[in-house]
């Protein structure tokens, strides 16, 4: 990532999203006797105090992801608000049938919180990459998806997820923007206005998008709440930018294409989807390396946007 | 006809036959009737008039295939009218070949995909404990072939390790698994610290003894053998 935190002024500049999540969840556990956290070894070190204070509501099931999600579903059946947390591919992909059947199909809901994102632990490579997660949630009814771009965005998003009676997926990453952004209600946060296109940046790719669009006559709008996407806001912005839209998202390229296309179905429009490629790179290195390899660094995003605008 | 709490076992058997839902499982689909009947008739503290009482006992039918016996018992105990049993799995029926908890009064979970009920039961038992409801019990019924699913073994290991004493599993064993369980089903639970008992699936008193046997500090499994269909 091109942007690293500078001029640190807030605690959240120096902690990770995962640490911000654990701290907020711990506070919520203290305040809400109906909240429970289920872990599968991952992040147990961050929940030691919470587990000591609430041993019956902070549960580590070991490396058992089917049970992680199933037990969370059972807690919901018993009237609790469960948070299940582990590494993204094991939470969403390994246990996807549990995600599908153990909440919504039961008439209940839960909160899933992942770490790892698309390529956070690049040294670990594909087994720990989860670029497909948001696309999978799009196959299920009713899930909210939160993709914070900064640790300081995490507490409010967790609060929204926990307070809702709908299911929610909170996707945490080590990738982040220099500063927090976003709106309280999840509507698009317009950071720059232009005329040739609306560029929607999701979560931690915002700083790359801002750098990539410097000097381009485009609107840049940020969201950390891609589901439900603020399609009303997007329609308004698109109408003012020639119905030309680009979506830059830190997971599988095209994940939001159907939703954006559907939102603009009543008018001729152009859509560019920029995201993580489908191919398996079989590379190690750093997350920044993978961001560049997928064309998601500022240079790569800028090249895609300029070609898109030139083609219009 | 609403039978209410007055239906006899024999009437419930008739209801189960009336409700046979799936041609893939002809008469044998009532082999779970006795284990479920004994639970609802003699053990569970559930009031059909208040099926959402937070302090109620729970019964989770994990093995959702062939739910005729389950529907029959729920009807016999007054959770819904017995005439719902006619036309099961028709487009307008609330009762399908797999139960949907959002459609069936008294059904605690939607099931049909194997291996979900036991982990859900673990979570429910944890949740009851966490909310201070210490006298409610969670029963879950699985089939012997359903135990093939690895998700069950994650739950069996964990529940045994943490001594989840408000959890009771009933394995109805009709030897339907292809590979089976050399050394016995109960041994898979025992090695993980569970209390175990075996009973013939048609022996109501033996089932009742197992369901009510004290098992402080650990979960309990009843392996109910139904190798020959009693009906």
Image (spheres, coloured by chain):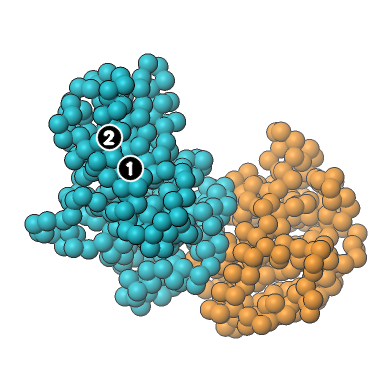
Q: In the image, A208: left or right of A36? A: left
Residue for badge 2: A303
Q: Same chain for labels 1 and 2? Say yes or no.
A: yes
Helix, strand, or loop for circle 2? Answer: helix
Q: Pinpoint the chain carrying mark 2.
A: A
Give percent across and percent down for residue A44.
Answer: 38, 72
* Callout count: 2
Assign the C terminus of chain A to one quadrant of the image.
top left
Q: Pinpoint the chain carrying mark 1.
A: A
Residue A31 visible, this orientation: no
Q: Residue at x 71, y 54 (%)?
A: B64
* Front residue of B52 and B221: B221
Q: Colour of chain A?
A: cyan
Picture quadrant where residue B182 is located: bottom right
Helix, strand, or loop for circle 1? Answer: loop
Give percent across and percent down for residue A104.
Answer: 53, 47
**C-alpha distance separating marks 1 and 2:** 9 Å
In the image, is residue A93 above or below residue A212?
A: below
Q: Residue at x 21, y 50 (%)?
A: A2
Residue for badge 1: A295
Q: Earlier in the sequence, mark 1 or mark 2?
A: 1
Q: Colour of chain B?
A: orange
Picture quadrant where residue B191 is located: bottom right
């Amino acid at each position: 990532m091109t942007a690293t935190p500078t001029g640190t002024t807030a605690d959240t500049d120096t902690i990770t999203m995962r640490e911000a999540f654990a701290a907020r969840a711990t506070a919520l556990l203290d305040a809400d006797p109906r909240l429970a956290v289920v872990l599968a070894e991952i992040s147990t070190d961050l929940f030691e105090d919470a587990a000591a204070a609430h041993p019956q509501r902070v549960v580590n099931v070991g490396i058992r992801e089917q049970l992680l999600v199933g037990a969370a579903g059972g807690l919901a059946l018993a009237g609790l608000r469960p948070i299940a947390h582990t590494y993204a591919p094991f939470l969403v992909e390994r246990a996807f049938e549990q995600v599908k059947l153990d909440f919504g199909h039961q008439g209940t809901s839960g909160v899933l919180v992942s770490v790892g994102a698309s390529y956070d632990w690049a040294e670990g490579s594909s087994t720990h990459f989860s670029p497909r997660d948001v696309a999978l949630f799009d196959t299920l009814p009713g899930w909210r998806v939160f993709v914070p771009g900064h640790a300081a965005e995490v507490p409010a998003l967790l609060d929204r997820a926990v307070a809702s009676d709908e299911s929610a997926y909170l996707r945490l990453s080590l990738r982040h923007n220099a500063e927090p952004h976003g709106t309280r209600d999840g509507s698009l946060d317009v950071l720059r206005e232009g005329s040739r296109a609306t560029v929607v940046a999701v979560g931690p790719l915002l700083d790359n998008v801002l750098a990539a669009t410097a000097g381009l006559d485009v609107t840049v709008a940020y969201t950390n709440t891609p589901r439900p996407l603020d399609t009303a806001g997007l329609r308004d912005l698109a109408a003012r930018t020639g119905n030309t839209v680009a979506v830059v998202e830190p997971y599988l390229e095209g994940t939001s294409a159907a939703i954006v296309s559907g939102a603009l179905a009543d008018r001729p429009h152009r859509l560019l989807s920029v995201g993580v490629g489908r191919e398996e790179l079989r590379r190690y290195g750093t997350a920044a390396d993978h961001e560049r390899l997928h064309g998601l660094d500022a240079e790569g995003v800028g090249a895609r946007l300029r070609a898109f605008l030139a083609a219009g | 006809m609403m039978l209410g709490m007055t239906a006899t076992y024999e009437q419930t058997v008739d209801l189960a036959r009336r409700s046979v839902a799936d041609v893939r499982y002809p008469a044998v689909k009532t082999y779970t009737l006795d284990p479920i009947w004994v639970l609802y008739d003699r053990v569970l503290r559930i009031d059909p008039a208040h099926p959402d009482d937070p302090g109620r006992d729970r019964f989770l039918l994990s093995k959702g295939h062939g739910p005729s016996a389950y529907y029959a018992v729920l009807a016999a105990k007054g959770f819904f009218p017995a005439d719902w049993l006619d036309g099961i799995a028709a487009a307008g029926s609330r009762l399908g070949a797999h139960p949907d908890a959002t459609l069936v009064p008294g059904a605690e979970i939607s099931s049909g995909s194997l291996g979900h009920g036991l982990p859900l039961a673990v979570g429910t038992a944890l949740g009851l404990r966490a909310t201070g409801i210490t006298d409610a019990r969670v029963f879950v019924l699985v089939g012997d072939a359903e135990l093939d699913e690895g998700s069950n073994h994650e739950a069996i290991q964990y529940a045994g390790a943490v001594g989840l004493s408000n959890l009771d599993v009933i394995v109805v064993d009709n030897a339907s698994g292809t590979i089976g369980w050399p050394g016995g089903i109960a041994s898979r639970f025992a090695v993980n610290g569970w209390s175990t008992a075996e009973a013939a699936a048609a022996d109501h008193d033996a089932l009742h003894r197992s369901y009510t046997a004290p098992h402080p500090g650990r979960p309990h499994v009843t392996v109910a053998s139904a190798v020959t269909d009693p009906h």
